[in-house]
Amino acid sequence: MPTQEEIQAVKETATLLTAIGQEAGKRAMEFLTLSNGGGAVAALAFMGSSASFHDAFAIRILFCLYVIGLVIVGTMMVRDVEYTRDVVWRFGDGALEFYKGKGSAKDVFAIVDRDAARRHANVNRRLGMASLMIFGISTLGTCFWLLFQAFQSVVG
């Protein structure tokens, strides 16, 4: 039968897992979503307000890059939700067996497959870097394009 200390440790771990899963993903996703989403909205606003430039091929490419960044962020979000759900469910299954007296506290805490967690983190880190790089390229591309247009209007 589980001791009171083991039960308390399992409950505290459940609370911490939930908080960690929610907060870690939330912060990264907010930043990437706002940056790429803001870029896409800015590109759309620029296309709509500048009648002479809304057909420009460069603006459409830059807009597509922002959208690709958003798709990558969405992929990361889905991956995080699925991974967190799996960990929480495994924890719940282990905790249920533990409360029934069929498992030990050690079994409950062995919920995370370290190799799978490492793979998940590596893939999401690469997706996050790709999204951030696409945002940077899109933003720099937009700046250079605007500078080029300004230079042409002054010279031409």
Image (cartoon, rainbow, N blue to C red):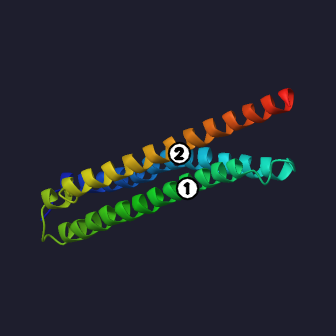
Disc 1 on helix, strand or loop? helix
Tag 2: residue type? Ile
Task: From the image, tell me which residue sits under label 2.
Answer: 134
Amino acid, disc 1: Ile
**Can residue 2 be seen in this snapshot?**
yes
The image shows a total of numbered marks equal to 2
- Horizontal placement of 30 versus 128: left or right? right
- To which residue does mark 1 refer? 68
Q: Quadrant of the N terminus?
A: bottom left
Numbered mark located on residue 28 in the image: none
Q: Residue at x 70, y 38 (%)?
A: 145
> What residue appears at the point 24 percent right and 57 percent down from the top-left corner?
116
Query: Is 105 drawn above or below residue 98 in the view shown?
Result: above
- Residue 44 percent location from the top left of the image: 75, 52
How far across and down, in percent of the image, does residue 89 sit?
31, 68
- Along the polypeptide, which appears first: circle 1 or circle 2? 1
Q: Position of residue 156 (x, y in %)?
A: 86, 31
**Within the image, what quadrant is residue 96 found in?**
bottom left
Q: Is residue 27 left or right of residue 93?
A: right
Q: Quadrant of residue 91?
A: bottom left
Element at label 2: helix
Q: Residue furthest front?
A: 156
The residues bearing labels 1 and 2 have C-alpha atoms spaced at a distance of: 8 Å
Decide: marks 1, 2 in contact (CB < 8 A)?
Answer: yes
Q: Is residue 8 visible?
A: no
Q: Does 95 sit left or right of 136 as displayed? A: left
Q: Position of residue 39 (x, y in %)?
A: 66, 46
Question: Mark 2, residues whose alpha carbon is within 10 Å: few (<14), some, or many (≥20)?
Answer: many
Q: Nearer the viewer, residue 65 or 97?
A: 65
User: Which class describes the residues within 10 Å of circle 1: few (<14), some (14-19), or many (20+)?
Assistant: some
- Determine the residue positioned at 64% across, 52% down: 61
Work out whether residue 94 or residue 23 is closer to the camera in this orientation and state it: 23
